[in-house]
Structures are given as structure tokens and as C-alpha cells.
Amino acid sequence: MFESPVSAGIIKLVSFDHIRSAVQLAGLAHQEELIFNSHNEEGTSFYSHKAYVTGSIMLCVAFIEARINELIVGATINVNPWNKGIVDENTYKSFQQAGILDGINNLRLLEKYQFVLSFFGKQQFKKEKPPYQDVSLLISLRNKLVHFKPEIQWLNDEHYFLKHFKSKKLSLNPIVEKSKSSEFPDILLGYGCAKWAIMSSLKFVTDFDARLKLYSNYMDLEKECKGLLLRKQKDT
């Protein structure tokens, strides 16, 4: 009689990969802007630069979604990686109930974070304040890029969506700014926007981790990325 072979499997966590990749793309966008600002416009590729910034923004949102899904799926299959000391074991086991997990999957992205905080008795994010407010705007930007709808942009009027970024004081895209173009989204898609997206998403996730007292290496990554991005900014 033959015994069934023992099967083994692994869980791939990609949230860390997403945010690291976003930083890399932001750095490439920064290099393109350095070339442009040094008056070597022929060496600058508009489409490469746009791809770097857009890719960085997309990956930041992917990072936010992957992070909460890793927690949810970990509960589903009774695996609790990187979540040392999240809550007591009995509470964590109750989180594995099928009804709860099904309910989470039907929620919007940021609502999942709020649900988890509420379930574990932690204070939810205030929607009208950072970091929730910033990542909500980030997701709106991502959605506008993915589900882009052409519209008339009057030359003498600022695009309504750009007004949401006034308080962020982001550096605009120098490649199109020099041409006096105020077209959305191109005027916004610069290194400054990619940097804001990275720092906003990291701040949101590290704040979430802190509320749940999760073991997380994103706090170290936030400091590392902030230092890296600041160094790049000083190079301009």
C-alpha cells in the first residue's frame, strides 16, 4: 500500500516588493528630470519619465492592497507571518471565521483597514486627516489614470482634480511645465508626485501596523526611503 506524498507549499508576500519597486521607479524618474533640468532636453524621454512616475503610483496602491490581503489570507489559512504579537491567539482565531473573511472581501480597499482595526478594538483612521486622507487621494489618482476619461480642459482654468494637491506642495512635472502646459494628468506626473505617493502609502501602513502592534519592517523601510528620496531631492 502506497502512502500519499507529503505536499509542501510556500506563501509569497509581495507588498514589500511593490513598495521597493515604486522607490526604484521614482529614482529613475528623478534621473530623467535631472537630465532635463541640466538643459540636455534631447536626452530626456517624455514617455520613459511618464512610465516611471505612473508605475510608481500604481505600485504604491498595489502595496497598500497587498499588505492588507496578506493579513487576511494569513488568517484564512492559519498562517501568521510577520504578525508577531498582533493580538492574543484566541482573538486571532476568531478572525478566521468564514463569515468575517467573506465580509472583508466585499469591502473597498481602505474600508478593509478600518474593519480590521475595529474588529481588534483599535482606533480607526480619521478619514478627513492624514494618513488616510492622503492615501484616499492617492487611490483616486490611480483610478483616474487607470479609468481615464477624456474631457475638455479649458486653457485658462486649472483642472479641478489638481486643486486637491494644492496643500501637498508637490513639485510639478518639469518636462511639461516648461511648455506652460497645465493639462491633467501630465502636469502632475513628476518625481514630486511619485515621492508623495511612496511616503503617503508607507506612512499609512506603518501607522496601521503601530495601531495593531504588529511586528513590521516597514517602519525601517519608511526611514530608509525617506532618507533616499531626500538625498535625491538635494541632488537637483
Image (cartoon, rainbow, N blue to C red):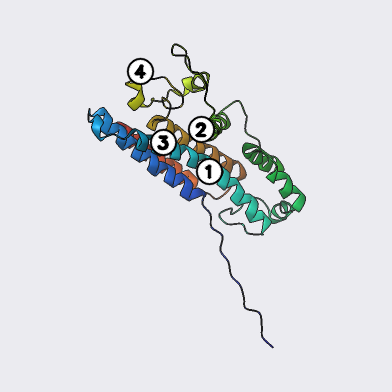
Mark found first going from the N terminus, 4 or 2: 2
3D distance between C-alphas at marks 4 and 1: 32 Å
Residue 38 visible to an observer of this rendering: yes
Say which residue label 4 marks.
180
The circle drawn on residue 145 is 2
Mark on residue 53?
3
Q: Residues within 10 Å of mark 1 (few under 14, many from 20)?
A: some
Q: State the residue position of label 1.
A: 62
Q: Nearer the viewer, mark 4 or mark 1?
A: 4
Q: Which residue is drawn at 44% across and 11% down?
A: 156
Q: Where is residue 54? Give x, y as percent.
A: 44, 36
Identify which residue, 92 or 181, lies in the foreground.
Answer: 181
Q: Nearer the viewer, residue 60 or 78?
A: 60
SS at mark 4 in the image: loop
Residue 97 is situated, as x and y percent measured from the top left of the image, at 75, 53
Please, what is the three-letter code of the amino acid marked with disc 4? Answer: Lys
Q: In this view, does 181 lie above or below 130?
A: above
Q: What distance separates the C-alpha of mark 3 from that of mark 2? A: 12 Å
Give above or below for 131 relative to 213: above
Q: Position of residue 78 (x, y in %)?
A: 66, 59
Cα gap from disc 1 to disc 3, whole angstroms: 14 Å
Residue at the image point whose x is 62% and y is 76% from the top:
6
Q: Residue 175 carries which label?
A: none
| SS for dot 3 | helix
Quadrant showing the C terminus: top left
Query: Which of the pair 190/49 is nearer the observer?
Result: 49
Amino acid type of the residue tagged 2 in the rendering: Leu
The N terminus: image quadrant: bottom right
